Amino acid sequence: MAEEIESGEQKVEVTQPIILNLGKQRRKRIKALMKGKGKLWFEVENVIEEVGTTLGNELDGKVVVPLILVYRRKPRRRRARRWFGL
């Protein structure tokens, strides 16, 4: 899960990112998540704990920092239908 990369004199350990898809959410839940509260934050905390138990000794001396991206898919633009007829 981890990969070592040499950059100059230092060795940097790069790990795979953990991506959590929370799906479509309401604005109130997103605002609460930004404040560190609510159902979504509870779900993020559960994933962090699960990752900690999965990695076990590999996680010693390291801190798991969640990086959460919230995005909204743009709706497809519908073309206006123009009917030409008699």
Image: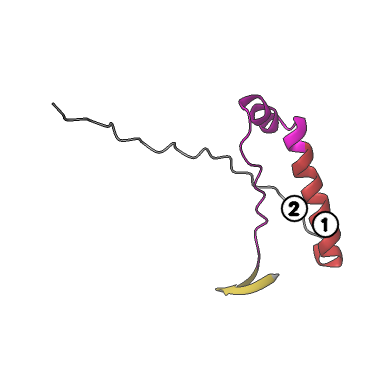
Residue 81 image point, x, y percent: 27, 32
Say whether residue 48 is left or right of residue 16. right
Residue 16 image point, x, y percent: 65, 63
74, 58: nearer the viewer:
74
Q: Is residue 82 visible?
A: yes
Q: Quadrant of the N terminus?
A: bottom right
For image coordinates 77% across by 54% down, the residue present is 63
Residue 64 is tagged as 2
- Crowding at dot 1, Cα within 10 Å, few <14 / some 14-19 / many 20+, comes out as some
Q: Which of marks 2 and 1 is nearer the N terminus?
A: 1
83, 44: nearer the viewer:
83
Q: Quadrant of the C terminus?
A: top left
63, 34: nearer the viewer:
34
The secondary element bearing badge 1 is classed as helix
Q: Quadrant of residue 51?
A: bottom right
Residue lying at the far left in this picture: please name it: 86
Q: Give the mark toward the camera: 2 or 1.
A: 1
Q: Give the range drawn in magenta.
A: 14-41
Instruction: Kindly identify the amino acid type of the residue bearing the numbered disc 1.
Output: Gly
Q: Quadrant of residue 32?
A: top right
